[in-house]
Image (tube, rainbow, N blue to C red):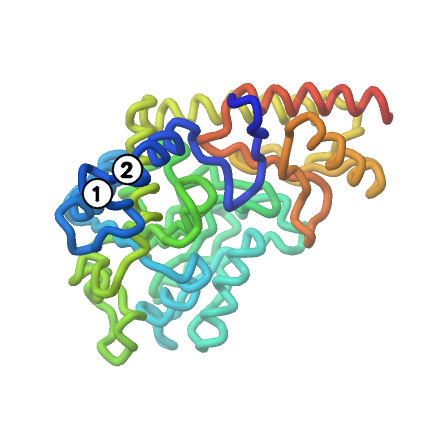
Amino acid sequence: MEADRVYNFNPGPATLPLEVLKEAQAEFLNFNHSGMSILEISHRAKQYAEVHQQAKADIKELMGLGDDYEVLFCQGGASQQFAMIPLNFATKEHPGSYVLSGSFATKAYKEAELLGVGEVAASSKAVDFRHIPTQDELTINPEAAYVHLCYNNTIYGTEYHYVPDTHGVPLFADMSSDMLSRPVDFQKFDFIYAGVQKNLGPAGVVLVVAKKELLAKSPQTLPTMLRYSTFLEKDSLYNTPPAFCIYMVGKVAAWIKANGGLAEMEKRNQKKAKVVYDAIDNSDGFYRGHADKDSRSFMNVTFRLPSEELEKKFVAEALEHQLSGVKGHRSVGGMRASIYNAMPYEGALRLAEFMEKFRKANA
């Protein structure tokens, strides 16, 4: 790691691969012999078109998807997709059915509820979102337009380790915080979206990967920019896209390919998660993990200390050890270490070593 850089455990905007940042830096002033920065170049230029198409191709290749799926680059964050999804696909007769496993899953449901087209398929709120609802806990409405999941819950540190069987109802997933972090049978999903600022790039673009047949069905009564069909028909170029963000997502996707693909990402992420979870489990109760063990996230490790005073001290001393962004979300408190694809194993190891040192000094 560069001497003046910290290990960045922030949940998003989050750490990016150092190699990618250096690549972008090297071509920042003169992109692809254009004499301009990628920030200045027209989204209609040939040089940008190559970036756009390569990013889409690499993402589909990593996901193992064919021509029946399309990659869109949207804006407004995942939060805007919370509203666009029910607007485009749900009706009172065929509502969106939501599995509530955390804060963002609940926010997505509330947008559908506001429109009068949302229902709850399952919820783990009663146990403070400590676990992912199991298949047996799901109540699947055969008339639902879709079943919606939040595949990894950044705030609570839980993650799906199975793909629910929806008995033929289209499966939708917010994968903002674990997209392209491990092999998944992506063909079981009809619609996937991800705000890229957690695991794939800088804030400003939302990645949507969905079946073309589904995307084409947007109601023509919706405003133009709220229709997924607009993005499909115009290749995400109806208006000026967030070109720099897409360029960075393309570079991260290429970096994942060059580093062994999703299988290698999973191997690395499990190794990183294990060293941090071991520090929690071997602490004699000094550290208390929030998530049930069978629902633990490989992306976001959440835990508490014996008191809020110690938690404040932990955050301050961690930064002195070049460990940044470990404070938990205000709604949960405690600590959260986000160990996305770009976090090197050395960062997770340094955090675990600091945790043990801090425990011995404060227990």
| Badge 2 amino acid | Met
Q: Name the side, left or right, on which 13 lies relative to 27.
A: right
Which residue does the image show at 37% across and 53% down from the upper left?
205
Secondary structure under the numbered disc 1 in the rendered image = loop
**Does residue 212 lie above or below 248 as drawn?**
below
| Residue 331 figure quarter | bottom right
**In the picture, which quadrant includes the C terminus?**
top right
Which residue does the image show at 36% across and 60% down from the upper left?
75
| Badge 1 amino acid | Gly
Position of residue 234 measured from the top left corner of the image (x, y, whole percent): 17, 62
Position of residue 144 measured from the top left corner of the image (x, y, whole percent): 37, 65
**Does residue 228 lie above or below 179 as drawn?**
below
Q: Name the side, left or right, on which 281 lies relative to 144.
A: right
Mark positioned earlier in the residue sequence (1 or 2) = 1
- Mark 1 lies on residue: 35
Q: Name the side, left or right, on which 93 lies relative to 125.
A: left
Seen from the viewer's position, the closer of residues 118 and 134 is 118
- Mark 2 lies on residue: 63
